[in-house]
Image (tube, rainbow, N blue to C red):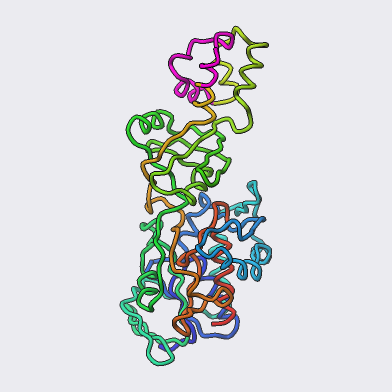
């Protein structure tokens, strides 16, 4: 079967690219080895799909080439995707910090994209394992479990390695290497931290408790919800920092980002000197957290009992707790993959390979990683749309 364009990967970027190219009158085949398209879309945002963010800037993305994202994000913006969502009358809301979610369910976004593909007469083929890809003269040949296909333009939208149970694989990276592209080291990102030993035991006791915290490493920090788990630390603030964390690096956590504990203690000494310090802390933090986190030596002390050493101990415990995570939960639970195909070898305007004419890469398979909060979806929409304009 001969097509103008074949898109490998029916995720967010692949669906957008296929629909955009099809609208231009191109004969498009969209293939995926999974049994259904858009599986990660369906599970995203707790089943409601955080499909973009109101505040999209290049600074919200990590890449070895930080300028690479600028062109695509500027040409297909969050407002363009919001307009498409509104056209389909999909209700949505801002959950806070500009994070846009469907009111109902994530399948609303997937059904919209599939409807766009149907209108553009895109042929969708699932359960389609690709056995080999070759470039012969000026076209590509794909040998698949569903037959052999040829095309003039080939788009790789295979995503990263995160959540293999959803069908993630390294196929896109293998294909890139086949065509002499550099694949930068990859790792799980937007992912919970794991702890070990007594530190893990301490966190496990608090499993299920969440607090607002600031979590930092030497280069950056984020404030938001932190969740204790049986294996370590999770929650939005933790996931955000994981984008910037390296194995073996210490992190510092402030469990009272909106207060200065030293000042609180000085005030409590004046106004509530006879009250136990743990009861006063429970006005600021969950009871179970305070009971577990407060040093044993201070459990029965009143505010008036606290000396300078006690005050510093409390400060270090609640506002400057330092720990070295043993690692992360890995690709099993990671939302994205950091690293990927070197963007220096891909056009930032068309997403065409600089090595192989007619070969394109879009979405997460590239060395572009967004923050938590709809940024990675916006990258998928923007890169898919830009490539769809030219293939």
Image vertical order of residue 317 relative to residue 87, above or below: above
Residue that appears at 44% across and 83% down: 356
Residue that appears at 63% across and 21% down: 264
Residue that appears at 43% across and 45% down: 192
Residue 230 location (% of width, % of height): 38, 36
Q: Quadrant of residue 176?
A: bottom left
Residue 290 location (% of width, % of height): 50, 22
Name the side, left or right, on which 216 lies relative to 2: right
User: Where the N terminus falls, by quadrant?
Assistant: bottom left
Q: Nearer the viewer, residue 263 or 194?
A: 263
Q: Nearer the viewer, residue 1 or 141?
A: 141
Residue 296 in magenta stretch: yes
- Seen as rendered, the residue at the extreme bottom is 137
Image vertical order of residue 130 relative to residue 196, above or below: below
Name the side, left or right, on which 224 lies relative to 89: left
Residue that appears at 46% across and 54% down: 335
Name the side, left or right, on which 135 lies relative to 294: left
Q: Quadrant of residue 255?
A: top right
Residue 308 in magenta stretch: yes
Q: Nearer the viewer, residue 240 or 333?
A: 240
Span highlighted in magenta in the image: 286-312
Residue 166 location (% of width, % of height): 39, 59
């Amino acid at each position: 079967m001969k097509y103008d364009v074949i898109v490998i990967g029916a995720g967010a970027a692949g669906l957008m690219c296929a629909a955009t190219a099809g609208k231009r009158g191109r004969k498009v085949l969209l293939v995926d080895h999974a049994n259904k398209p858009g599986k990660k879309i369906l599970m995203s945002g707790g089943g409601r799909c955080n499909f973009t963010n109101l505040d999209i800037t290049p600074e919200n993305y990590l890449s070895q080439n930080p300028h690479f994202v600028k062109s695509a994000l500027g040409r297909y913006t969050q407002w363009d995707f919001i307009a498409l969502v509104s056209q389909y009358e999909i209700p949505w809301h801002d959950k806070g910090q500009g994070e846009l979610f469907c009111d109902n369910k994530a399948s609303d976004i997937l059904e919209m994209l599939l409807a766009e593909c149907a209108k553009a007469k895109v042929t969708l083929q699932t359960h389609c394992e690709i056995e080999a890809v070759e470039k012969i003269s000026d076209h590509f040949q794909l040998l698949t479990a569903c037959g052999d296909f040829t095309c003039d333009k080939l788009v790789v939208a295979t995503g990263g390695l995160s959540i293999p149970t959803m069908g993630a694989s390294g196929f896109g990276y293998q294909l890139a290497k086949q065509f002499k592209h550099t694949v930068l080291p990859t790792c799980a990102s937007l992912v919970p931290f794991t702890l070990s030993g007594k530190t893990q035991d301490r966190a496990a006791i608090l499993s299920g408790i969440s607090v607002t915290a600031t979590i930092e490493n030497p280069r950056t920090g984020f404030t938001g919800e932190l969740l204790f788990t049986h294996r370590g630390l999770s929650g939005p603030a933790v996931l955000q920092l994981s984008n910037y964390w390296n194995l073996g690096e210490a992190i510092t956590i402030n469990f009272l980002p909106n207060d200065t504990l030293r000042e609180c203690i000085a005030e409590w000494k004046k106004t509530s000197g006879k009250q136990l310090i743990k009861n006063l802390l429970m006005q600021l933090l969950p009871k179970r957290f305070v009971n577990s986190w407060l040093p044993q030596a201070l459990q029965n002390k009143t505010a008036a009992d606290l000396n300078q050493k006690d005050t510093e101990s409390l400060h270090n415990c609640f506002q400057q707790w330092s720990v070295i995570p043993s690692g992360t939960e890995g690709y099993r639970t990671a939302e994205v993959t950091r690293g990927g195909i070197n963007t220096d070898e891909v056009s930032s305007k068309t997403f065409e390979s600089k090595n192989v004419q007619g070969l394109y890469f879009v979405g997460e398979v590239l060395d572009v990683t967004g923050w938590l909060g709809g940024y990675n979806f916006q990258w998928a929409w923007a890169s898919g749309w830009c490539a769809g304009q030219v293939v």
